[in-house]
Image (cartoon, helix red, strand yellow):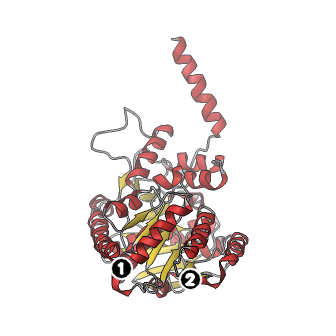
Amino acid sequence: MAKIICVTTSPYPYGDNITDGPGYRAYSLFQKLREKHDITILSLYESFHLHKLDESRYLEDSIRIRTIKYTPSRVAEAIREESPEVIYVPWSALSFLSRFKEKVPTIIDYVGSGLLEELATTGRVPAHLLKLTLDSFWRGDFLITSGARFRFFILAMLIAAKKATLITATPTDPLIHLVPMSLPPDQLPIRSPRRIDSKRIQLLVAGATLPWYDYPTVFEALEKASQKGLDYEMVFMGGNPRNPDFERSIRAKAEALGDRVSFTGVVPFRKRSDFYERADVGLNIAKPTLEDELSIRTRIFDYMWAGLPVATCGKDQYSDLVIQEGAGFRYQAGDADDLVDGLLLLSGDKGFMAKAKIGVSKVRNIIENDSAGIQDLEEFLKEPYVDKGRRSTARIVSAAAVTVRDYLGSLSKTRK
């Protein structure tokens, strides 16, 4: 048994808390690990995002949760108080460990697309995130990610960071280990096609109200579908406490559709099943970007957990799996008419829904079989180690300096 401590700024779903992508990943991973290992969560979410500075302790699913102040000095102090054998940290939270100098074996999880997410939402990659990513490869001892496609992206970044070279790489070292995402426990029954009322279909977009969702296409499709006789109810589950102005703007744009469209606001993670159980179809409405293609959509996982067929415009790894196994349909991103055709098919073709039920079962089995393969991670937890090339404190070099250095280096080689 290893004593593991997780340091995270993502909301861990205890009590009435919500969660996000990295929080969902940690939760599903720790549900698999908690029977063999001692796990404590150092949650910085409450202080960093909600500005709640009071510290507290909770126990849920045999996992201890401590909410602490997010300052690096307090984080370092809390880690020392726990005396962990292993530290688990999402890569984006590494900067909060800057005052912790001891070299405790550390797992860094490259969860969430990070740089690509910023590119998709703002059109640029902030220099500080690029530097943090490149530097993070030197901070950990066991690097993991949940997506096969995203792993190749990280491998390219490892080369850019000079962590992976022809000299250091070996055939037996994967450099970054693939630890697939798993479904949370207590899965809901797979939706039966017989329960769909031919006169009304219950649609659900789950998750926070996010700027990388394509709401205009969905709203246009609902208007056109209504004109073609589709009777529906659409529920947008989840608010956005970090960006309430954006949430209000989306609600305002939906008002023209009337009372058939509703917004739940924030829904605690453990109460989300109340809305899933009423739904017939789950929608993934992410915008078509490079981030989408490389990402892991936790929304797809949660729809599978809920037993729902999926309508998706995504090109991510698990949207492809849903389509491959017949667990839903794909519509062309930005094409409202294509989405309308798919919704009319779902509501009018019981045979299609029966096939989708079988497809959901297949996808569940594939995900569970894939996520069972965490042997490499278990081996590390059995005998944790510190990588000999590990740096305890980052040496941050500006992006400009890296560019100049590499350019001058290439010139010197050309002259030889």
Q: Which residue is mark 1?
A: 185
Tag nearer the camera, 2 or 1: 2
Q: Tell me where residue 88 appears, x and y as whole percent.
A: 45, 64
Tag 2: amino acid: Val
| Residue in the image at 47% along x and 53% along y | 293
Residue 152 position (above or below residue 241) = above
Residue 383 position (above or below residue 359) = above
* Distance between the alpha carbons at the discs numbered 2 and 1: 18 Å
Q: Is residue 149 left or right of residue 130?
A: left
Q: Tell me where residue 324 appears, x and y as whole percent.
A: 32, 60
Residue 408 position (above or below residue 258) = above
Q: Which residue is mark 2?
A: 267
Q: Is residue 368 left or right of residue 144?
A: left
Residue 370 position (above or below residue 273) = above
Disc 1 secondary structure class: loop
| Residue in the image at 46% along x and 42% along y | 158
Tag 1: amino acid: Pro
Disc 2 secondary structure class: loop
